[in-house]
Image (spheres, rainbow, N blue to C red):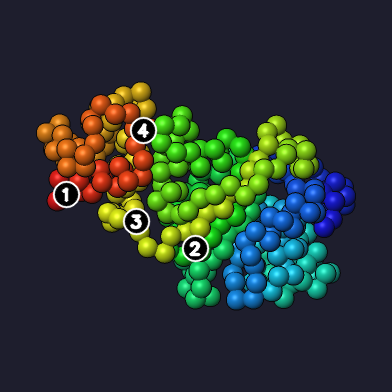
Amino acid sequence: MISPRQALKKLGRRPVKGLGQHFLIHRATAEKIAAAIRPGPGDVVVEIGAGLGALTLPLSRSGARVVAVEVDPELAEFMRKQLYENGSDKLVSIECLDILQLDFGALYDRFSTKLKIIGNLPYNISSPVLFKLMGEARCLQEAVLMLQNEVAERLLAGPGSKDHGILSVMSEYHSERRRLMRVKSSQFYPVPKVDSQVICLSFRACPLAPRVEADWLLHVVKCAFAHRRKTLRNSLLAGKLPDLTPESLDIALENAAIEPRRRPESLDLGDFLRLAEALARGKA
């Protein structure tokens, strides 16, 4: 693992703040994170943000096929040369593009296997990437992601927590979530202002019961949390649910066995599933 300082000096450049570039500098931590995805022959691992190769290099020795995505053209070319010099380029491809533009479905179809995802997500794109992964859940097996503390807490939050919201509800719907480790800011160059956590998402093979369309559940959850200070009933009425009337909402809440005056953050995933199902019946 090349030192980020040395690599950047060799390239004659500095980290790009706008790309959220904070490079992991501890080899043992990088290898522990890479091992957490359990890469091996037959696996296809998509790395989000290859950077200077802290995760890419240990992944390249696992026997898995690795698709390393890096939006910075100079770093992507640097990694291609590094892999070639190490003789590790046979099973690793470096794709220079924005991860939000990557077609996970095409990779799934190409390799005929569910993908494993790994990466250190910059704060500014963490939520969009997480929602993209949830939208592609049918193609994914597992994700091991390093996130800043704030995003990790929102992802893992449960009912009653101030962090409980759209991200925690939808991530629980699509996956089993667990915290793997905490990573101090001192393990990065340059040093970010906050610590990070490594989170594992194991994507569900089958939807939870009652079965509802994921897009519809997301729409209901977004409407519920759009006005957090309102009661659930008032928040939903203020939302953009199609053909919803006070009367039809009251019926749906009664069928879902949910008290209208509850706050959205008090509902668990089961509550939201029953509510989404009842609202879907009401608009049918």
Amino acid type assigned to the residue bearing label 3 in the image: Leu
Measuring 57% from the left and 53% from the top, which residue is drawn there? 200
Is tag 1's residue or tag 4's residue first in the polypeptide sequence?
4
**Closer mark to the observer between disc 4 and disc 2:** 4
Amino acid type assigned to the residue bearing label 1 in the image: Arg
- Few, some or many residues within 10 Å of mark 1 (<14, 14–19, 20+): few
Measuring 68% from the left and 52% from the top, which residue is drawn there? 72
Q: Is residue 77 visible?
A: no
**Closer mark to the observer between disc 1 and disc 4:** 4
> Residue 243: x and y, percent?
16, 40
CB within 8 Å, label 1 to label 4: no
> Residue 271: x and y, percent?
30, 42
Residue bearing the label numbered 4: 266
Is tag 4's residue or tag 3's residue first in the polypeptide sequence?
3
Spatial distance from mark 4 to mark 3, Cα to Cα?
Answer: 20 Å
Measuring 81% from the left and 45% from the top, which residue is drawn there? 13
Is tag 2's residue or tag 3's residue first in the polypeptide sequence?
2
Amino acid type assigned to the residue bearing label 4 in the image: Ser
Q: Is residue 231 left or right of residue 178?
A: left
Is tag 2's residue or tag 1's residue first in the polypeptide sequence?
2
Element at label 4: helix
Spatial distance from mark 2 to mark 1, Cα to Cα?
Answer: 30 Å
Looking at the picture, tell me which residue is in the foreground, 107 or 158. Answer: 158
**Closer mark to the observer between disc 2 and disc 3:** 3
Residue bearing the label numbered 1: 281
- Few, some or many residues within 10 Å of mark 3 (<14, 14–19, 20+): some
Residue with the most extreme left position: 247
Residue with the most extreme top position: 229
Residue bearing the label numbered 3: 208
